[in-house]
Image (cartoon, helix red, strand yellow):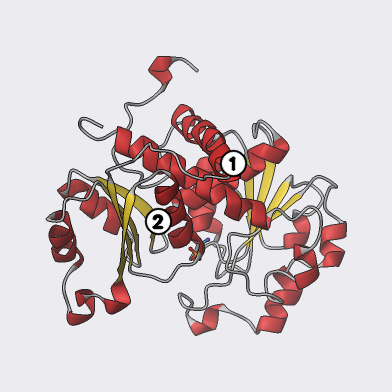
Amino acid sequence: MSKSDIQPWPKDVLGLRGMNKSTMTRILDTAVQFRTVSKRAVKKVPTLRGRTVIMAFFENSTRTKLSFEVAAKRLSADVISFSASTSSSKKGETLLDTAKNLSAMSPDAMVLRHSQTGAPHLLAKHFDWSVINAGDGINEHPSQGLLDILTMRDHLGDLTGKHIGIVGDIQHSRVARSNIFGLQTMGARVSIAGPGTMCPKHYESLGVQVVHSIDDLLDSVDAIMMLRVQRERLGIAMLPSVEEYASLYGLNVERLRKCQSHCLVMHPGPINHGVEMMPDVLDDPRSVVMEQVANGIAIRMAILHLALSGQKGG
Ligand code: CP
């Protein structure tokens, strides 16, 4: 990688669409360095001492919110948690007004999860501090895409030419979109499978192969990522019965037997057990679901460190 391949470091991390391979590789390599911090007795480095990071989650989260918090604290940042459910947004305050008020408290970064596509992009345009997209509607979830790619790179090495299958509710999945953009940039081939209503043919325009049966993918994929059926975003007509979905698209032991011996089993969480993934699949040695969670901390440390270094004077 030459210096000229690296884009000037941006203050915001909004998505993997358009992020080049050098930039993505730099985040992954920085995460690998930060991974050692979590293995020490004292899990802290002074990188972001004196900097303030706001966690603003307007949608529920366990993994992303907590691991961004852990990441910021391991970098010695001061962390303020904003919970939409107990805030004045419940009284009708707009996102922009909320952000203006939080901006008056001189933060250095905001990690934002919001149901509206483009919400982080809006704030990034208005403010000097860094905006990190922790999931915007059905658009992107870049830190999840990066932690998934790091987990795959750990096991599969260079992802060039590797075949990755993503199965389930692609249409409503920001995880799928960030993985599709990121994996293609890293040279992987992506195939998606799911019911026609959740996995539309027009996704081929993103350069992926669309198949409608999980069984078409099993013997050729190097990793298979199962997605949660997002009942909160689904029209009722989109989902056959849960039993039918599980039998047609769920990953079970019989299907896993048809996968290659090195094929990684992945899921971003939270899992609908017995729907997209059967409980015994999670116990298979090929399952890396908890490694994904652990890598989330290192990736988020790298994102916070690099984004804040991209600010004026950072
Ligand atoms: N993978 C993921 O985004 O999980 P949370 O919704 O719990 O953050």
Return the residue found at the far front: 41
What amino acid does circle 1 point to? Answer: Leu
Depth check: give the residue in front, 278 or 234. Answer: 278
Q: Position of residue 20 (x, y in %)?
A: 44, 31
Q: In the drawing, does residue 100 fall left or right of residue 198?
A: left
**Local secondary structure at mark 1:** helix
* Labels 1 and 2: the sequence-earlier one: 2
- Identify the image quadrant of the C terminus: top left
The residue where tag 2 is placed is: 134
Q: Position of residue 262 (x, y in %)?
A: 81, 45
* Circle 1 residues within 10 Å: few <14, some 14–19, many ≥20: many
Q: In the drawing, does residue 239 fall left or right of residue 142?
A: right
For marks 1 and 2, give the CA distance: 17 Å
Depth check: give the residue in front, 4 or 85. Answer: 85
Q: In the drawing, does residue 258 fall left or right of residue 182?
A: right
Relative to 247, residue 204 above or below: above
The residue where tag 1 is placed is: 150
Depth check: give the residue in front, 107 or 3. Answer: 107
Q: Position of residue 242 (x, y in %)?
A: 66, 82
**Local secondary structure at mark 2:** strand
Residue at position x 27%, y 51% from top?
121
Relative to 171, residue 47 above or below: above
Residue at position x 34%, y 40% from top?
48
The answer to whether residue 23 shows anywhere in this view is: yes
Relative to 40, residue 216 above or below: below
Depth check: give the residue in front, 251 or 149. Answer: 149
The image quadrant that residue 306 belongs to is top left
Q: Position of residue 217 (x, y in %)?
A: 75, 53
* Circles 1 and 2 in contact, beta carbons < 8 Å: no
Residue at position x 17%, y 78% from top?
92
